[in-house]
């Protein structure tokens, strides 16, 4: 027994030494460092396998390859926007302008070269059936190109309907390019897009691997959902392609999400983002700027917006900065919808300051998990928000997947980024930040309608939770920096 004990202690010491060397080998924030050290020591040996797939950061070579694709078609527009800022501090129209929104537009322009586009026509979809009905209709009308990114693309009824529409346009000579995430669409099957490819279209995985069971980049997910049609119509938001997004899965029930359809120059920013992602996913077939990809579009509506993207290829965390800016400049109200509420210390403190400043902070989360571990962490942080005086609503009419934030009924963000550390740092995300009181008020209306189908999380409810449930929430929170 003495020999066995000595061997065990030696192995644990060796595991601890290797854990320290492994974690400190790559630069990361303190919270993530401690979370990985905890995991590697709680699960000796097994923890290293998890780290091998989920803990390694993108190599400098891969980051360089991704960054080399930046800003296709955008530099001229960015310079024109900066010149406009120098001449006129009022970036927005008189009816939509104030000091805060000008500062926010400038933040994105400087930090991520996200151009401010005026006069867009924006439609909001909160129901999957309506969204896909319109999307398929738009696809069939495509004349030059269809560019598409989805985190999840399923081989089911709606997936086949979308594929059929893509095949129809490819057969007509329209350029059809599809990117799907290697992890999110892992169940798609290798032959799903075969007919599309025979007709001249292309479909490629983002950060895929020759060996499906070994993918060292699996932790870096392209969580974006983008469709660009002829450079004139764009889609961005929370819906993926699958029957569950139409409420056809009993596990989730009705699927509540939010998606945008954009007409106007905002589409050009989505186009640029797609081209960058395509060139990163398919480096041997790089796309370049053409006038067909970036047609000049006149005024279509009244919405001014910026398309902002973020990902692990940069330390800036642009979308998180946008959320922080919105929270910090709110004067009256903050409405947030997110399926995962796992904020870092900066976001948590900003929300706490807002609540203590008398601002009406409302947060809505689902009543059920699609990822149990993350959901337990979400409930932990939701409890924190209740304790400081925020109002947390549990959506009770199916599954809430919407990623939105509105402040003061004036500025609204809708996109793919959740209020969690993964979306801030590890996923490739994209959001539309809109400076339009009408759009903001419409989103607030949707939020208030959802409140009728939700219940308020109270201290009484939290006090009635079992010790085991509270333990799972606290334990899950320990790993929130690496979830």
Image (cartoon, rainbow, N blue to C red):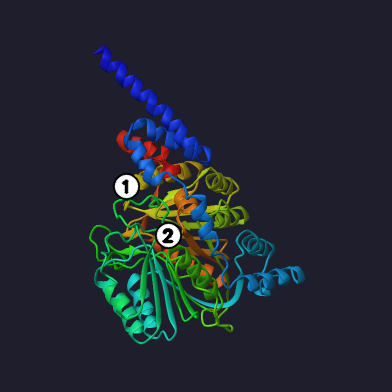
Res 146 → quadrant: bottom left
Q: Callout 2: few (<14), some (14-19), or many (20+) C-alpha neighbours within 10 Å? A: many
Mark number displayed over residue 327 = none
| Left or right: 288 as drawn, with respect to 177 | right
Q: Nearer the viewer, residue 164 or 214?
A: 214
Q: Residue furthest front?
A: 284
Above or below residue 399? Residue 379 is above
Residue at point 38%, 86% (across, down)? 173
Tell me the residue that label 1 is attached to: 372
| Image mark count | 2
Q: Does any portion of residue 312 appear in the rendered image?
A: no
Quadrant housing the N terminus = top left
Q: Position of residue 180 (x, y in %)?
A: 37, 65
Residue at point 34%, 20% (across, down)? 9
Q: Does any portion of residue 24 appear in the rendered image?
A: yes
Res 8 → quadrant: top left
Residue at point 36%, 77% (across, down)? 201
Tell me the residue that label 2 is attached to: 222
Q: Nearer the viewer, residue 214 or 16?
A: 214
Res 114 → quadrant: bottom right
Q: CA distance from mark 1 to mark 2?
A: 21 Å
Q: Callout 1: few (<14), some (14-19), or many (20+) C-alpha neighbours within 10 Å? A: few
């Amino acid at each position: 027994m003495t020999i066995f004990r000595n061997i065990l202690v030696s192995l644990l010491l060796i595991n601890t030494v290797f854990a320290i060397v492994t974690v400190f080998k790559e630069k990361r924030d303190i919270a993530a460092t401690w979370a990985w050290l905890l995991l590697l020591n709680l699960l000796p040996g097994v923890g290293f396998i998890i780290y091998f797939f989920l803990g390694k950061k993108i190599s400098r070579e891969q980051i360089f390859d991704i960054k080399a694709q930046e800003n296709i078609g955008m530099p001229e527009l960015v310079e024109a926007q900066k010149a406009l800022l120098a001449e006129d501090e009022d970036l927005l129209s008189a009816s939509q302008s104030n000091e805060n929104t000008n500062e926010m537009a400038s933040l994105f322009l400087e930090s991520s070269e996200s151009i401010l586009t005026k006069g867009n026509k924006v439609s909001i979809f909160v129901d999957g059936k309506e969204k896909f009905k319109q999307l398929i209709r738009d696809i069939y009308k495509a004349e030059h190109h269809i560019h598409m990114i989805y985190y999840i693309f399923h081989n089911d009824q709606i997936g086949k309907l979308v594929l059929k529409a893509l095949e129809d346009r490819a057969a007509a000579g329209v350029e059809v390019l599809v990117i799907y995430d290697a992890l999110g669409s892992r169940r798609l099957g290798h032959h799903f897009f075969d007919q599309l490819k025979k007709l001249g279209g292309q479909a490629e995985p983002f950060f895929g691997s020759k060996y499906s069971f070994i993918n060292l980049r699996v932790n870096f997910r392209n969580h974006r959902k983008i469709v660009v049609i002829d450079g004139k119509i764009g889609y961005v938001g929370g819906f993926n392609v699958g029957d569950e997004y139409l409420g056809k899965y009993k596990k989730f029930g009705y699927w509540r999400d939010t998606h945008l359809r954009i007409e106007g120059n905002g589409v050009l920013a989505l186009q640029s983002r797609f081209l960058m992602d395509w060139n990163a996913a398919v480096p041997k077939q790089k796309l370049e700027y053409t006038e067909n990809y970036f047609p000049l579009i006149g005024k279509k509506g009244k919405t001014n917006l910026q398309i902002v993207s973020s990902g692990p290829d940069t330390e800036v965390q642009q979308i998180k900065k946008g959320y922080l800016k919105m929270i910090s400049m709110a004067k009256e109200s903050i409405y947030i919808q997110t399926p995962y509420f796992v904020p870092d210390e900066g976001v948590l403190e900003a929300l706490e300051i807002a609540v203590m400043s008398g601002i009406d902070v409302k947060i809505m989360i689902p009543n059920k998990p699609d990822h149990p571990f993350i959901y337990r962490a979400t409930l932990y942080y939701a409890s924190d928000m209740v304790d400081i005086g925020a109002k947390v609503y549990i959506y009770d009419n199916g599954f809430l997947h919407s990623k939105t934030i509105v402040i003061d009924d004036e500025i609204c963000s809708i996109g793919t980024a959740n209020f969690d550390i993964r979306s801030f740092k590890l996923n490739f995300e994209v959001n539309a930040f809109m400076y339009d009181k009408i759009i903001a008020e419409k989103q607030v209306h949707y939020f208030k309608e959802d409140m009728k189908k939700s219940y308020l999380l109270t201290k009484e409810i939290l006090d009635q939770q079992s010790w085991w449930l509270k333990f799972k929430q606290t334990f899950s929170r320990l790993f929130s920096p690496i979830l």
